[in-house]
Amino acid sequence: MSFDRLQQKIDAMQNPTVVGLDPALEHVPPRILDRHFEKGETLEAAAEAILEFNAGLIDALCDIVPAVKPQSAYYEALGPAGVRALWRTCDYAKSKGMYVICDGKRNDIGSTAAAYSAAYLGTVKVGNTEIEPFGCDALTVNAYLGSDGIVPFIETAKKFDRAVFALVRTSNPSAGELQDRFVGHEMGCDDNHKYFVAHDRLYTVVGDLMEEISRDTVGKYGFTRVGAVVGATYPEEAAFLRARLKNTFFLVPGYGAQGGSAVDVAHSFDENGRGAVVNSSRGVIAAWKKTGVDYATAARNEAIRMRDELRQVVYR
């Protein structure tokens, strides 16, 4: 199963991290940009520069980091050339043995959801030929349309042995405006035979729903095909969700540049030090700006530092 493969890679490397390939042009070293811009400052040239940058990062990280997470927005911003760079980045990472999570936060219902899931997790039929557009191992999805926005992704994930990470408790500052709201629901009858109402935070209801609709997809390590995005910047909520969602694999953003510490992210792992992967994006890919060394070397050094820091709190 997809998350089994990710967990096996994490175990083999003793490194529960994923590097976000969020290549805003300001993160790309000038020497790369200048070379590609010699014939003009075009979207195509920018996309090629990003592709070279990504390939160098993947080469530097593939033997120590189990996974990468390209954020589709940075590629889509460059138009068709950027989308092609996303596809080539995913393909190159897979060729190096890395687990690929596309951070697209897709969501829709019915045939549109099925089309999104086919694009990133499955195949598309062209005439009589089945073609894999992106072939990612996992895709981030927005769970806040309810189950009919997620089930098509689960069905594709089952068919092609892939997985999804649903937004549950995100790391952004305003997340609580909606996700922390209390939601009441009928629980049963009290002694007077009247229905009483229990209250849960909205993010808890969403997490429970994701486990419920994926309960028939549990793999070797006890996790379903629907993981949860749970931000490092809310460690108490992460600890609560970890205890509650025992069959859910967590993707943990917010470490490093967003303020989450190793101690904070430790709450997302189970008692065996499994069930979560921690993301760092610009902290790794833009490390060269703070060190003055080659970008690939700087990224590798930062990835090793992050790995070693997490080992101290996860594998105690």
Image: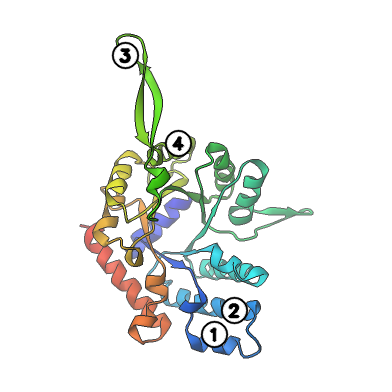
Q: In the image, is residue 20 above or below residue 6? A: below
Marks 1 and 2 in Cβ contact (< 8 Å): yes
Q: Which residue position holds label 1?
A: 33
Position of the C terminus, as image quadrant, is bottom left
Q: Earlier in the sequence, mark 1 or mark 2?
A: 1
Q: Which residue position holds label 2?
A: 46
Q: In the image, which is nearer the foreground, mark 4 or mark 2? A: 2
Residue 71 lies, in percent from the top left, at 51, 63
Q: Judge left or right: residue 100 versus residue 273.
A: right
Residue at x 37%, y 42% (from the top left corner):
180
| Kind of residue indicated by mark 4 | Leu
Dot 2: what SS? Answer: helix
Q: Which residue position holds label 4?
A: 209
| Kind of residue indicated by mark 2 | Ala
Q: CA distance from mark 4 to mark 2?
A: 41 Å
Dot 3: what SS? Answer: loop
Dot 4: what SS? Answer: helix
